[in-house]
Amino acid sequence: MASRTSILNRLKNTRVLLVLALVVVYAGATAYYVMSDTSVRGLTVKMFSLSRFCTEDSGIADRIVTYNVAGSVWSNHSLRTSITNLQFTLVVDGVRVETVNGQNVSFDPGNGSSFLLAFKDPSVDPRSLSSSPKVVLSLTARVSAGFASSTLTRSDSLLQDFGTTSC
């Protein structure tokens, strides 16, 4: 009888330890998934510098308006983040200027990646440009961190004072 109780106690102890181990594994996996998801959804894009100028195209008699945008992309959260299939779109006063592709990047927590982009708009008349347009830069990309991956669009906007209406 004593050996039977001893075996039952061991089985109960083993079950308790197994349940505890499963709870710890589940809690760890859940915490890692939450960190993964917040790292993906915490993606931020920011413009730091914007300039506008006109260039002459050899094949076109008119001048082409070019916008140079310098900025950065990062995630506010705690896991290494990878961004692929980057597409940057520039919209000026509600009119889409151009979409350009960016290079795939990865960065660790607390870091990011900078970019310098040129957007050309041959269809706009340089003599009719607004001196203070609203500029919106949108980034659409596949973002991955840990277990999570998603295609997201993030934007930044600013009201830029170029000083003159033409370039």
Image: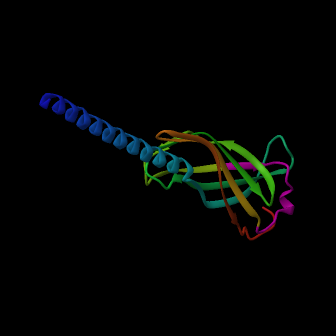
Tell me which corner region of the image, top left, top right, bottom left or bottom right, holds residue 92: bottom right
Expressed as whole percent of the image width and height from the top left, the position of residue 26 reads 40, 41
**Front-most of residues 152 and 83:** 152
Name the residue located 20 percent from the left edge and 33 percent from the top edge. Answer: 10
Q: From the image, which quarter does the C terminus lie in?
A: bottom right
Expressed as whole percent of the image width and height from the top left, the position of residue 109 reads 43, 51
**Front-most of residues 11 and 19:** 11
Please state if 47 lies on the left or on the right of 76 as rendered: right
Image vertical order of residue 38 relative to residue 51, above or below: above
- Inspect the magenta stretch and tell me whether residue 37 lies in it: no
- Inspect the magenta stretch and tell me whether residue 126 lies in it: yes
* Tally of marks: 0
Please state if 21 lies on the left or on the right of 39 as rendered: left
Q: Which residues are magenta?
A: 118-132
**Front-most of residues 32 and 1:** 1
Q: Residue furthest left?
A: 2
Name the residue located 72 percent from the left edge and 60 percent from the top edge. Answer: 135
Expressed as whole percent of the image width and height from the top left, the position of residue 20 reads 31, 42
Instruction: Identify the image's colour scheme: rainbow, by chain, secondary structure or one colour.
Output: rainbow
Name the residue located 14 percent from the left edge and 29 percent from the top edge. Answer: 1
Tell me which corner region of the image, top left, top right, bottom left or bottom right, holds residue 52: bottom right
Expressed as whole percent of the image width and height from the top left, the position of residue 29 reads 41, 41
Image vertical order of residue 72 relative to residue 103, above or below: below
